[in-house]
Amino acid sequence: MEAVKVKTDLHCDHCVQKVTPLLNEASMINNWSIDTEDGVKTLSAVGEGVNPGYLQGLLSQEGYSIVNNPPKPSFWLDNQVWQRASFNTLNCLIGCSIGDFGMIFFLQAFYPNTPMVWQMTLAIIAGLMTSIALETILLKRREKFDWSLALKTAFGMSFISMVAMEIAMTATDFMFTGGKAAFDQWQYWLALVPALVAGFITPLPYNYFKLKKFNKACH
C-alpha cells in the first residue's frame, strides 16, 4: 500500500508532538511519519482509505493544515518561526522578570546596603530560577510531563537564552536607574519598559535560529 504524502504547516518538534496523539489514534492509519528535517514538514501516512482530505481533517483539530507548493522563505524571513520564537521568548521574559525584579525589590526594601554587584548577581540568579520554575509548570500542565521530566526539559530548553535575557535586563535597568529601586518615583517604573524590551529582543534571534535550524522550540 502506497503512502499518502502531504506538505503541512507544521514547523517544529512541538507542533509534531501536538498532532502525534491524533495520528496514533486515527483508525484508518496503519503507520505514519513526518519528515522533521525538511523546512516544510511532509506527513506520510499509510492506511486503507487514507487521502489528503482525511489527513487535513485530523490536522485541523490542532489548528494545522495541508499546504500546496508553499514558498520556501529565506532562513531569516520565516514569519511562522518568528511568531513561535517570539511566543517562546515572551514566556521566558515573564518568568525571568518575576525573579529578577522581585529580587531587586526585596533587597532594596529589606537589605538596601547590599553591594550593587551582589544585587545584580542575585537578581540574575533569581530570574533564572523563576523562569525555569514557570516553564516547568507549563510543561506539566500543557504537555502532561511528570515533574522530573518537566524540570529537566525546562532547564535544558535554552539556558543560553535565559542568561542572555537576564544580563540584558539587568544591564539596561542599571543604566537607567543605577540599580536603585525608587518605588515612589514614576521615572523608575518607566525605566522598567526599556529593560523589558532589551530582555525580549536580546535572545530573540538566538531562539529563532535554534527553532529554525534544529526544528526545536526553545521554550
Image: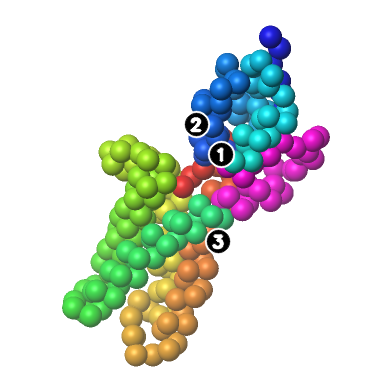
CA–CA distance in space, label 1 to label 2: 11 Å
Tell me which label, 1 or 3, sits earlier in the chain: 1
Residue that sits furthest to the top in the current view = 1
Q: Quadrant of residue 211?
A: top right
Left or right for 166, reference 212? left
| Residue 42 visible in the current orientation | yes
Q: Amino acid at mark 2?
A: Pro
At x 48%, y 63%, the residue is 199
At x 72%, y 36%, the residue is 66
CA–CA distance in space, label 1 to label 3: 24 Å
Q: Viewer-nearest of labels 1 and 2?
A: 2
Left or right for 92, reference 49? left
Pointer 1 residue: 15
Mark 1 neighbour density, 10 Å: few (under 14) some (14–19) many (20 or more): some
Between residues 148 and 168, which one lies in front from this camera angle?
148
The image quadrant where one finds the N terminus is top right
Q: Amino acid at mark 3?
A: Ile
Q: Quadrant of residue 11?
A: top right
Q: Which residues are magenta?
A: 62-85
Relative vertical location of residue 85 with respect to residue 71 in this rendering, above or below: below
Q: What secondary structure is found at the residue carrying circle 3?
A: helix
Mark 2 neighbour density, 10 Å: few (under 14) some (14–19) many (20 or more): few
Across and down, in percent, residue 23 comes to 56, 28
Pointer 2 residue: 21
Q: Viewer-nearest of labels 3 and 2?
A: 2
At x 50%, y 55%, the residue is 89
Q: Which mark is residue 201?
A: 3
Across and down, in percent, residue 104 comes to 30, 72
Relative vertical location of residue 208 with respect to residue 145 in this rendering, above or below: below
Classified by dominant secondary structure, the portion drawn in magenta counts as loop
Tell me which label, 3 or 2, sits earlier in the chain: 2
Is 22 included in the stretch rendered in magenta?
Answer: no
